[in-house]
Image: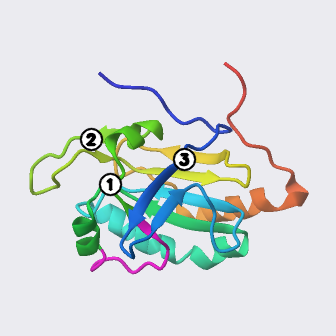
Amino acid sequence: MAYTNKLAAGSEFPSITLKDLEGGEQTLGKPREGATWQMVVIYRGRHCPMCTRYLNHLEDYKEKLADIGIDIVAASGDSSAQLEEHMTRLEVSFPLAYGLSEAQMKELGLWVSLPRSEQETDHNFAEPGLFVINEQGTVQVVDISNNPFVRPDLETLVNGLAWIRNPDNNYPIRGTAPY
């Protein structure tokens, strides 16, 4: 019934390239604009008001993340038309990509849900996931949820990432002890 292929901290982040609304492509986990790390936010899609709020709130932290060398990309399984409609409610300047396939969702270890109705959406969708990938392409931080109500608090997360990025702290990837 359920799968347990969760992307582990310290593992290599998979190579996934998706389209954006500008006609370009976004490669998840590949930092841009002079950043050395990237935060990848997977959201449920336009049908989720909590996702809209979270993405809009994340915009408030974009500059602080940039100051510590982390850029942002967000992606969902929505179509280009669904993302275009969602953009009318989003106030973000970081890239948004669309078309994350169910196979890619599972490759990332995300929980996948069935729509409750056609009014919700027309495809299976990923529940929230947040990954921070370091300059080696390794998963430094991972947060995977099976519902929209559990997500990292952005202020705590960004402050923690600033602490991790400070070379004086020599903070390793956590959660990598062998079983």
Q: Amino acid at mark 3?
A: Ser
Q: What's the distance in space between the residues labelled 3 and 2, CA to CA?
A: 23 Å
In the picture, the disc for residue 111 is none
> Residue lying furthest front in this view?
23
Find residue 94 and report its horizontal and vertical position in percent. 50, 74
Q: Residue at x 42, y 68 (%)?
A: 96
Precedes in sequence: disc 3 or disc 2: 3
Measured in 3D between alpha carbons, the distance from the residue under mark 3 to the one under mark 1, in whole angstroms, is 20 Å
The residue drawn where x is 63% and y is 63% is: 31
User: Which element is circle 2 on?
Assistant: strand
> What crowding class fits label 2: few (fewer than 14 Cα within 10 Å), some (14-19), or many (20 or more)?
some
Relative depth, front residue between 51 and 42: 42
174 drawn magenta: no
Query: Label 2, on which residue?
Result: 113
Name which of mark 2 and mark 1 comes first in the sequence.
Answer: 1
Residue that numbered label 1 is attached to = 44
- For this view, does 30 lie left or right of residue 5? right
* Quadrant in the rendering for residue 70: bottom right
Q: Residue 67, percent across and down?
A: 71, 75
Q: Nearer the viewer, residue 178 or 137?
A: 137
> Which residue position is annotated with label 3?
15
Circles 3 and 1, Cβ within 8 Å, touching? The answer is no
Residue drawn at point x = 50 percent, y = 33 percent: 6
The spot of residue 84 in percent (x, y) is 27, 73
- Region in magenta: 87-96
Distance from the alpha carbon under mark 2 to that under mark 1: 9 Å
Disc 1, SS: loop
**What residue type is disc 2 on?**
Ser
Q: Are marks 2 and 1 in contact (CB under 8 Å)?
A: yes
Q: Earlier in the sequence, mark 3 or mark 1?
A: 3
